[in-house]
Image (cartoon, rainbow, N blue to C red):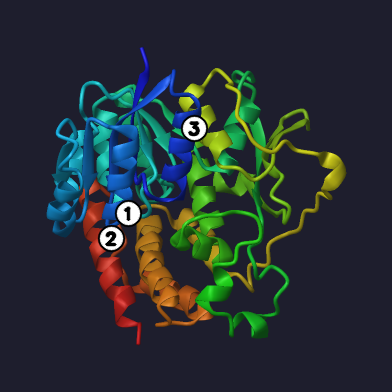
Amino acid sequence: MKKQIAILGSTGSIGTQALDVIKEHEDLYEVYCLTANNRVKELAQQAHLFKPAAVVIANEAHYDELKSLLADEPDIKVYAGEKALDEIVQADPIDMVLTAMVGFAGLSPTVHAIKAHKKICLANKETLVVAGELICQLANEYRAPILPVDSEHSAIFQSIVGEGDNPIEKILLTCSGGPFRTFSAEQIAKVTAADALKHPTWDMGAKITIDSASLMNKGFEVMEAKWLFGVPADRIQVLIHPQSIVHSAVQFCDGSVKAQLGVPDMRLPIQYAFSYPDRLHLSGERLDLFRHTLEFFEPDLEKFRCLALAFEAIRRGGNMPCIVNAANEVVNEAFRHDRCTFPQMAEIIEKTMQRATFDSNPSLETYFNTDAEARAIASCYLS
């Protein structure tokens, strides 16, 4: 029997590469559901190609257009709206849910998929950033496995497979450093969104690419690693590694370090999450270490304030990571539309952290309220 997969965010970078994996192993996997937020034409094209049982467009304004584009596919059910996302992930035939949506929007459908006992292939890091403790509790309660899809967390997972209960002394979380790694503070003050979108090694969506340039993405990945692997943040070390060959590593109590290496290709961690514990053949470039110099540097927390703010949010705990995530989503979009400068992103996030209501023991409802409040506060600081 083929494994039935729901892809939340199928038109984005992770979603499209996941479809490449499914196409390469169509004897093992089948698409049950595809979803998108606004890219209705791309979603319809994917549906024509992969023939899922259902498609969901989160923005209800696009429902009629999607319905029309799929009029010649009577077997494909078409739904719209956020509630439809929550409902479709609970469908009985689904074996695993790839959460490739970007941002806070991924939280609710992930919670519903966990409660439906689905295997979660997690690419939406904000789910753990915002509500890591709650998500881990629910996954344990409903016995829903969570397998990481981020290249760094997949690398950590691959490094600890087979280690049993051997204690982790330190996680070494690698980071390309983004396009501004060697820039001075004066140069960074003048960069544009077009500059920030030129990532040196990875091909990603716009939001994540900007987060990578500011290193906020790495701060979020520290939070994600904390919850996925049960390691305190003070034992997670960020290493700037411009070549993006060592995807991350784990240091054990005897001083031994295990790392996962490979060319920058997100299909590998996606496929490993689908196939674990098996490894399947994957077409593509192979790593040639004779062609690569491996370098590692410490991050500059003064120059990249977003990473420092992420560590501060981890230290404070509670709903503070949720506050940071909401403010970051606002300023990230604002920077992409020339409504704030690159340094102002960190400044507005910090001001939002100071003003938003702090809750040391948040519930799921608190996270939704916090997200709305922090977005409103951050928006007040934009021109």
* Cβ atoms at labels 3 and 2 below 8 Å apart: no
* Nearest to the observer: residue 59 or residue 114: 59
The residue most toward the left is 64
Expressed as whole percent of the image width and height from the top left, the position of residue 328 reads 41, 66
Does any portion of residue 246 appear in the rendered image? yes
Tell me the SS state at disc 2.
helix
Q: Find disc 2 in the rendering and name its residue.
A: 371
Residue type at mark 3 is Val
* Circle nearer the N terminus (1, 3): 3
Identify which residue is drawn at 42% across, 53% down: 317
* Cβ atoms at labels 2 and 1 below 8 Å apart: yes
Question: From the image, which quarter does the C terminus lie in?
Answer: bottom left
Q: Find disc 1 in the rendering and name its residue.
A: 104
The residue most toward the front is 72
Reply above or below: 89 against 43.
above
Expressed as whole percent of the image width and height from the top left, the position of residue 277 reads 54, 18
